[in-house]
Image (tube, grey):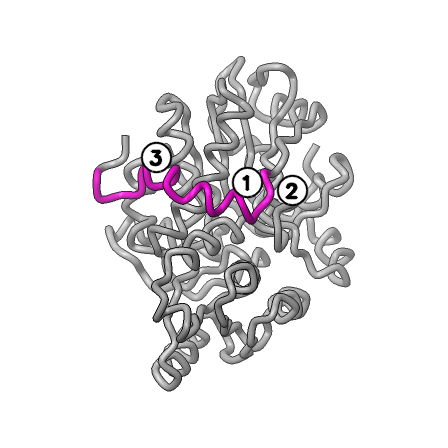
Amino acid sequence: MAPPELVDLAAIEAVRPVVAERVHRTPLLSSAAAARVVGASTGARIAGGRLYLKAEHLQKTGSFKARGMTARVARLSPDERRRGIITVSAGNAAQGYAFAGAALDVPVTVVMPAAANPSKAAAAAGYGARVVLEGDDVGQTFEAMERIRADEGLVFCHPFDDPDVIAGHGTAGLELVEDLPDVDVVVVGIGGGGLISGIAAGVRGLRPSTRIYGVEPTGSDAITRGLAAGEPVPVSPVSVADGLNAPFAGALPLRMIAALLEDVILIDDGLILGGLRFALERMKQVLEPAGAAALAATLAGRIPIRDGETVAVVLSGGNVQVDRLGELIARAQPLG
């Protein structure tokens, strides 16, 4: 059970109605081909001969972010709604807040790095958000966001270090356990830590014996460094998985990860892209690199799995830049 200062099952259940009203209950897919690869790499037989996959890449906005951002915007006061909100994001959180703002009639400004994925920026604008492209990296983009917030009196909504955001993301964990009650292992990609914190709280709240593993890029290791330091540490993320490129770990996610996770596994970009390629070729699912990280680590045998266990992987996003798919696949490490 989570310590009382952390987001817990009750907090997730409290936001679930407003989230469920506006986002998809995503399907739980399964793959026998993926299970065979995991078995070959780990020597463990997966229960049922299938790897289970929580399909958050099929969520509204193309990622899990719509869950937590809807929960956060729904909790705004009348004055905050009138003033409007601002956030900073490499892409998926921008779309999540833009979607939530449109659904709940709240003006949204999103500040993204100048080199942000064009399709993600266009999608955020398509939901009605004002999109500002500024900064050579996410750290500089945070600085630009703070300047605009102060000048215009906007309400800052954090992309990952927020209890309402984490609780909203946790609804995916509740769905996973409801659809797969005997799940033994859950694997989730990590950026700033919001998704895995929420899922861990939800899954462990319903099934305390389940083990949760996080997967982080070697080129974007804010959580690993933060756990070692005991506090958020600034990093300069350079991973191809732009959705995981947080410039620091959230303080609340760090506490939750330390309390609820078994381990955080580091993998390189070639392996992450191997997961993307496997999903496309063998599972017919289009993922962005960030959405494929947890799958890649599982296929490569990096996650401790015991014989006969039921294993679920969260496919967290599918907002890949389509014109880069050929390049990304060419860089992939073969899996299976």
Q: Which badge, 1 or 2, is on the more N-terminal residue? A: 2
Q: Tell me whether the residue at label 1 lies in contact with that at label 2, contact meaning CB atoms closer than 8 angstroms.
A: yes
Going by the numbered disc 2, the residue's amino acid type is Gly
| Disc 2 target residue | 275
Could you say where residue 201 lies in the image, as x and y percent from the top left?
Answer: 36, 36
Q: Residue at the left extreme?
A: 4
Q: Residue at x 39, y 48 (%)?
A: 166
Q: Please say whether residue 11 is one of the residues in the magenta stretch.
A: yes
Q: Is residue 271 visible?
A: no
Could you say where residue 193 lies in the image, as x and y percent from the top left?
Answer: 40, 50
The magenta span reads 4-25
Q: Nearer the viewer, residue 163 or 236?
A: 163
3 vs 2, front mark:
3
| Disc 1 target residue | 294
Q: Residue at x 50, y 55 (%)?
A: 244
Q: Is residue 5 left or right of residue 172?
A: left
Q: Which badge, 3 or 2, is on the more N-terminal residue? A: 3
| Disc 3 target residue | 9
Residue 157's image quarter? bottom left
Q: Is residue 134 left or right of residue 273?
A: left
Q: CA distance from mark 1 to mark 2?
A: 8 Å
SS state under label 2? helix
SS state under label 3? helix
Q: CA distance from mark 3 to mark 1?
A: 23 Å
SS state under label 1? helix
> Split into 4 quadrants, where in the image is the N terminus?
top left
Q: Nearer the viewer, residue 134 or 98?
A: 98
Q: CA distance from mark 3 to mark 2?
A: 31 Å
